[in-house]
Image (cartoon, coloured by chain):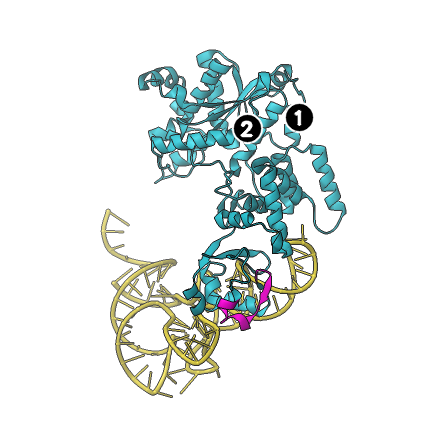
Chain colours: A cyan, B yellow
Amino acid sequence: MSTIDAGLLADLQARGLVNQMTGDEKLEQHLSESSITLYCGFDPTADSLHIGSLVPLLTLKRFQDAGHKPIALVGGATGLIGDPSFKAQERQLNTPDIVSGWVDKLKQQVSRFIDFQSGENSAEVVNNLDWCSEMSALDFLRDVGKHFSVNNMINKESVKQRIDREGSGISFTEFSYMLLQSFDFAELYARHNCTLQIGGSDQWGNIVGGVELTRKMKSGHVFGLTLPLVTKSDGTKFGKTESGTIWLDESKTSPYAFYQFWLGTADADVYKFLKYFTFLPVNQIDDIQAQDESTSGRPQAQSVLAAEVTGLIHGQDGLDAAKRITDSLFSGSLEQLSESDLEQLQLDGLPFTSLDEVELSEKPLTTLLSESGMTKAAREVKDALGRSAVLINGVVKSMEDNMKAPECFSRETALFGRFYIVRLGKKKYHLFGRG
RNA sequence: GCAGGGGUUCCCGAGUGGCCAAAGGGAUCAGACUGUAAAUCUGACGCGCAAGCUUCGGUGGUUCGAAUCCACCCCCCUGCACCA
């Protein structure tokens, strides 16, 4: 039986994690009086969550740590419909068996973050398909639909652009999404006495819908709280890199790539992200910031952030591997790398190209490296060669080596008899291998 | 439809017969400096290791030689007219 941390809301606010909430003081009181049950939904729109879902996921954990019971809802039903909130276009529907496969994956992923062995406030994972699938369309329209005013729904900010804008439009399917999510809340209230829903700020409309529906259908007083959308100071979209989305699944984004992503956080964002994405106390984060500001040179915040979040998602082993790979790559001492590190890098850590004898004997390095995608044009390789900026397994190559590809990629210099780490410039790496 | 302006290498934008693979700026890549940062400076920036090859809306022509001149065509913008 855990005790309730009444300072939770204050902590969330100090972290900048509270965007909007219903019934300010009442919610605060509600949270401090007793252990409550809360939920957050995750729709299966892919076979893995990405770091965009991390803030709500970690917030569930924060509530659990403060003595409350978290429910992670995986949207087996809502995932079949598609949330139109702030989406510019109607989305393609996925088939039921694809969605149900994704549901299974998300369930596992979500389960790693919350604790199922903590007595009274053990976490639960539920699937809204369990209660949605058994309801008939007529029941849904009569019991749920009757409580919603189309007039109000049309005026929601989240669907406005779809209603107003010519050429986009919204199907009835997506338009009814809000009813399904609202029904989830009412249902979780009835089944689990769940009295709080959290979600991203784009979910405000759907959450308020659920609060109202619960009152109307179940006469229950429940609350909603939204979390901020994660933004970057330079205005670019958070969570994307040139190589794509940062996923939580290690087979989609390797621990090394994940670690590197956080290490690259801009100074202007890093302290905010420490508050959002780690469990470090706010005052400790403030200390880090104060220290960084008082010393010139490299701030420690990025490495703290990268280590904390990578450890959280990929565990100690994943973090160790990420650090080891980072160290050897950037220090140039590749001998630290184990064969399994290289195999992981081949799998998803670094872009990989396999070489064959014929290519090696026919093509100059400029062609080989540019065809691997390391540069857009062979000219860039030439430029780099001329500036001693190309290293193969730590050995500097020059323009003289350009026509000597077989020597550069010789058996003797390969790591574990088959790997070559090619570095172009300061941070562009590519793995080459021979069979 | 008439009159006028314009289409240049990723973007903006010079260039009106050879010295033009084409000024300048931006973006991008690399080097120095740094913190795997920012700013700054340097180099590269059609393709090619090279010899060389291919570009300036399209096609054809004039010329020893064309992004530049001529003809026709396509597209964009601006006035005017037509329609209403």
Q: Which residue is mark 2?
A: A226
Up-down relation of residue B35 to residue A369 (above or below): above
Residue nearer the viewer, A362 or A41:
A362
The boundaries of the magenta stretch are A392-407
| Residue A343 in the figure: left or right of residue A334 | left
Amino acid type of disc 1? Ala
- Which label's residue is closer to the chain start, 1 or 2? 1
| Residue A43 in the figure: left or right of residue A314 | left
Residue B26 image offset from top left, x and y in percent: 55, 60
Residue A284 image offset from top left, x and y in percent: 72, 35
- State which chain disc 2 sits on: A
Picture quadrant of residue A95: top left
| Residue drawn where x is 46% and y is 36% of the image | A48
Q: Alpha carbon of mark 1 to alpha carbon of mark 2: how far?
A: 15 Å
Image quadrant containing the N terminus of chain A: top right
Q: Element at badge 1?
A: helix
Q: Element at badge 2?
A: strand
| Residue drawn where x is 36% and y is 21% of the image | A133
Residue nearer the viewer, A35 or A329:
A329
Residue B83 image offset from top left, x and y in percent: 23, 51
| Residue A179 in the figure: left or right of residue A7 | left
Image quadrant containing the C terminus of chain A: bottom left
Of all residues, the one furthest to the top in this rendering is A219
Q: Which residue is mark 1?
A: A10
Amino acid type of disc 2? Thr
| Residue drawn where x is 46% and y is 12% of the image | A218
10 Å crowding of disc 2: few (<14), some (14-19), many (20+): many
